[in-house]
């Protein structure tokens, strides 16, 4: 289906009433049946300045890619056609020729190239998209007839009824069909592109031929004329804008080859030429087609071979946007048109002066409006600042209260800190007193340890003395006991021998003394044993006692 979502309602309605969209749908289905999902080689890209043929090329790419989803495996122009590369294409590739107005002997180089392909590939299906057909000589017709009739699978679309009659009756192509110009497949694209350009600012734009198809029209030199050659005089400066538009319209995937990009630049410039005009005057067929797609009222003049009239009669005569003038019959109307152009120019100057006044007034109003808006903005800003100030004041009061509460808390903490400091000082003094006490105790302990060490040393010495004394006492005791025994024996002997009483008394006295000494020795021995078992410094008393015994 044709995508109409981006086109304006008025021009779409006009094209629909003219039957253009119905014709596009019919052509789409006919081509779909002929291609039948096979690969496509699209030939005869327009490597020349005619922007109308570049519109046709992009319209054909839209048909083949957007509507039929064809696999285009090869593209070529007349100049860069490569037979070797062409022969490498898949066997089922369908050859599709660019439509347009160069079928016949007026543009013989294109016709000969086309016929050489048709003659050289009888086994391939070949489609010629809608063409206007015109021959200057009968010889040319006969030559083409002999070649075209020899192809068993050739399918030709004629762009108007006269061309269809030539194809069927004079070229013998009975299968030829009527088909509308493929440039109309760009209707939605043209409307989207037009929306990116400035509004019209000129009363009239004249797009008039300057080539072999130009028909003298009797117009004077007062008209400012354009032709498709104007597209290329400024092409370099327009390339950047054209590429930007291609990107912004998301058409880079649709028109992605080098051929497409060149054709797009020429389409872009063609739209730029016609866009400023409120009214279009043209003898270019695609000036007429483009004006219809742009929704612009226009006057269509015929060309030398009648192509414009024939196309109008076939497709667009019912459009309310076109007025057709035949130069050979309506020269008076052309003169009126030229005078009308002069009047329009004068009126345009007056309008420009009024527009200048209006613009100055609008600028004044805009300046006053800007001042008012600025004052309102300043008022709003001040109001906002006032609200901010109130908010800041409230926030400041809250912060002040918080600061006071924090100050009170810190003061309480300070008091607690002072109390803690006093407690710590008291504990420190107590600790110091305890430290002094412990130090004194340590000194006492050191003194006691020294005294104890000295006492221990004396005790050790006393023990040694006691041991020596004990040894002497033991020896003396043994001697005393031995003496007692001796005396006892002597006493017994004396009794036995009958010694005197004096001697006996003496012996008794000596024995008693010996026994007394032995008893005292036993006592002393006990004291020595006690001394030896004691580590106390209190051993001096027993020692003194023992000492007294042995003095």
Image (spheres, grey):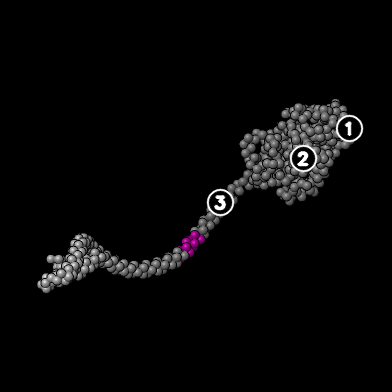
- Spatial CA span between label 3 and label 1: 69 Å
Give the camera-side residue of 150 and 101.
150
Residue 170 in percent (x, y) is at: 88, 32
Q: Residues within 10 Å of mark 1 (few under 14, many from 20)?
A: some
Q: Secondary structure at mark 1?
A: loop
Q: Residue at x 18, y 63 (%)?
A: 479
Dot in front, 2 or 3: 2
* Residue occupied by mark 2: 70
Q: Is residue 545 left or right of residue 136?
A: left
Q: Is residue 367 magenta?
A: no
Query: Which residue is disc 1 drawn over?
Result: 172
- Residue 76 shows in the view: yes
Magenta span: 380-390
Q: Residue at x 63, y 44 (%)?
A: 349
Element at badge 2?
Answer: loop
Residue 132 in picture, x, y percent from top left: 81, 35
Mark 2 or 3, nearer chain start? 2
Say whether disc 2 or disc 1 marks the residue closer to the N-terminus: 2
> Between tags 3 and 1, which lies in front?
1
- In percent of width and height, residue 491 lies at 16, 70
Q: Which mark is residue 418?
A: none
Task: Check the picture and name the quadrant holding the C terminus.
Answer: bottom left
Above or below, comparing residue 196 to residue 174 in the picture: below
Crowd class of label 2 (few under 14; some 14 to 19; many from 20; radius 10 Å): some
220 and 128: which is toward the camera: 128
Left/right placement of residue 302 relative to residue 239 reads right
Q: Main secondary structure of the magenta part?
A: helix
In the image, is 129 to the left or to the right of 201? right
Residue drawn where x is 65% and y is 33% of the image: 233
Residue 363: numbered disc: 3
Regarding residue 440, the answer to whether it shows in the image is no
Q: Horizontally, is 521 left or right of 56 in the view? A: left
């Amino acid at each position: 289906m044709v995508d109409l979502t981006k086109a304006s309602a008025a021009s779409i309605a006009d094209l629909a009433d003219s039957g253009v969209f119905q014709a596009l749908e019919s052509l789409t289905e006919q081509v779909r049946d002929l291609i039948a999902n096979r690969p496509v080689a699209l030939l005869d890209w327009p490597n020349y300045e005619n922007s109308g043929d570049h519109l046709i090329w992009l319209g054909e790419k839209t048909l083949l890619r957007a509507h039929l989803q064809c696999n285009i495996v090869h593209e070529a122009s007349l100049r860069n056609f490569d037979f070797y590369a062409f022969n490498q294409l898949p066997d089922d590739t369908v050859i599709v020729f660019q439509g347009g107005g160069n079928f016949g002997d007026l543009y013989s180089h294109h016709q000969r190239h086309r016929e050489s392909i048709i003659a050289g590939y009888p086994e391939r299906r070949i489609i010629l998209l809608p063409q206007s057909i015109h021959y200057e000589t009968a010889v040319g017709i006969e030559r083409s007839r002999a070649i075209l009739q020899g192809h068993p699978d050739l399918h030709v679309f004629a762009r108007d009824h006269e061309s269809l009659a030539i194809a069927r009756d004079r070229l013998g192509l009975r299968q030829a069909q009527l088909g509308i110009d493929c440039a109309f497949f760009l209707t939605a694209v043209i409307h989207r592109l037009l929306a990116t350009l400035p509004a019209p600012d000129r009363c009239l734009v004249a797009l008039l031929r300057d080539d072999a198809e130009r028909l003298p029209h009797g117009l004077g030199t007062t008209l400012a004329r354009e032709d498709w050659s104007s597209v290329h005089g400024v092409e370099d400066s327009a390339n950047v804008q054209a590429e930007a538009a291609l990107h912004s319209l998301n058409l880079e995937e649709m028109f992605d080859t080098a051929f497409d990009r060149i054709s797009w630049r020429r389409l872009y410039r063609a739209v730029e030429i016609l866009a400023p005009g409120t009214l279009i005057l043209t003898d270019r067929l695609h000036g007429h087609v483009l004006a219809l797609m742009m929704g612009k009222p226009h006057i269509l003049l015929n060309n030398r071979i009648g192509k414009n009239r024939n196309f109008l009669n076939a497709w667009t005569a019912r459009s309310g946007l076109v007025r057709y003038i035949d130069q050979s019959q309506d020269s008076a109307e052309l003169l009126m048109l030229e005078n009308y152009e002069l009047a329009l120019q004068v009126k345009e100057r007056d309008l420009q002066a009024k527009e200048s006044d209006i613009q100055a007034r609008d600028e004044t109003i805009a300046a006053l409006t800007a001042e008012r808006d600025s004052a309102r903005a300043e008022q709003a800003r001040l109001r906002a600042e006032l609200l901010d100030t109130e908010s800041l004041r409230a926030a400041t009061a809250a912060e002040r209260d918080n600061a006071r509460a924090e100050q009170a808390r810190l003061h309480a903490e300070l008091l607690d800190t002072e109390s803690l400091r006093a407690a710590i000082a008291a504990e420190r003094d107590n600790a110091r007193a305890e430290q002094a006490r412990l130090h004194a105790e340590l000194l006492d302990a050191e003194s006691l340890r020294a005294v104890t060490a000295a006492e221990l040393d004396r005790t050790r010495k006393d023990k040694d003395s006691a041991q020596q004394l004990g040894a002497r006492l033991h020896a003396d005791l043994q001697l005393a006991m031995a003496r007692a025994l001796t005396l006892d024996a002597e006493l017994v002997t004396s009794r036995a021998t009958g010694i005197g009483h004096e001697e006996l008394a003496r012996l008794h006295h000596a024995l008693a003394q010996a026994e007394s000494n032995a008893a005292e020795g036993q006592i002393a021995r006990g004291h020595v044993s006690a001394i030896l078992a004691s580590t106390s410094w209190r051993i001096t008393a027993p020692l003194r006692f023992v000492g007294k015994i042995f003095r």
